[in-house]
Amino acid sequence: MKVFNKQFFIGLSSGIILTIMLLIASTFVIVHLFKQSVESTMAIAKSNQPKKEIPLPAPPLPSTQKLDFNWKIQSIEGEEIDFSTYEGKVVFLNFWATWCRPCIAEMSSIQRLYELLKDEGLEVVCISNENPEKVEEFIKEKGYDLPIYIMKGWKPKVLMTRGIPATFIISKEGMIEYQHVGGAKWDDDSVESFIRKLLNV
């Protein structure tokens, strides 16, 4: 009986081929795992590096936004008023509505600010875009005596906001010195101090 027959060489060849395939597969797995390890290490190293800050421009100080006074409002009684009558004065300008909860929440503090600084020269102008009768009813019900007006036509682009209440504090030079969207406590000492500086009192 021959040991090295045809079946022997076929089996030997198959074994060698299988061994080579296993080696290739093992090598592929090892290379893949090594690659993953390297990528993971690089990712960790990258995450530990200080992140670059996005460059931001400095805020424009002092204010560079000048208000256009060439527009109109009207009193609750229907009298048309040129906003230019407030030119050269310090103005607390507030846009609000009777249905706006933050507007209602801050209204009492605006009333107190008005009482505090009206004799010092501060002009408070609260503007709604609603029906005059509805606004008048609301003011009487709450007992406010603020200067309340109705929007008439357009308003300057610099006064456009995404929401209300929207408040602007304007200097005698017509510059928008401060603006804020949302409710706030306007009779705060910091606000009083800021406005007094604009009034020079």
Image (cartoon, rainbow, N blue to C red):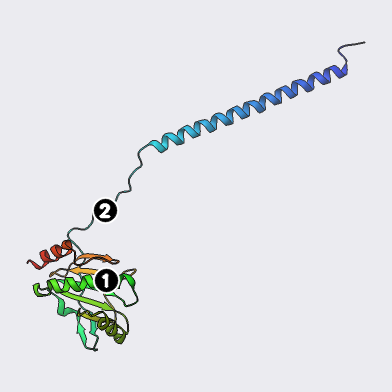
Indicate left or right for 124 with 29 as reference: left
Dot 2 amino acid type = Pro
Q: Quadrant of residue 195?
A: bottom left
In this rendering, position of residue 125 left or right of residue 43: left
Q: Which mark is residue 2?
A: none
Most extreme residue toward the left is: 201
The dot on residue 159 is: 1
Q: Residue at x 20, y 84 (%)?
A: 81
Determine the secondary structure under disc 1: helix
Q: Residue furthest right?
A: 1
Graded by Cα atoms within 10 Å as few (under 14), some (14 to 19) or many (20 or more), the crowding at tag 2 reads few
**Camera-side residue of 133 and 95:** 133
- Residue shown at 58%/28% (left/top)? 31
Would residue 197 appear left or right of 125 to someone viewing this image? Answer: left
Please state which of the two labelled residues, at mark 2 or mark 1, is closer to the viewer.
Answer: 1
Does residue 28 appear in this view? yes
Residue placed under numbered mark 2 in the picture: 57
The image quadrant of residue 117 is: bottom left
Distance Cα–Cα, label 2 vs label 1: 22 Å
List x then y, in percent, for residue 101. Answer: 33, 72
Instruction: Please give the name of the residue rendered at 24% of the width and 86% of the height, measured from the top-left corner.
Output: 76
Q: Are marks 2 and 1 in contact (CB under 8 Å)?
A: no
Could you say which quadrant of the image residue 65 lies in? bottom left
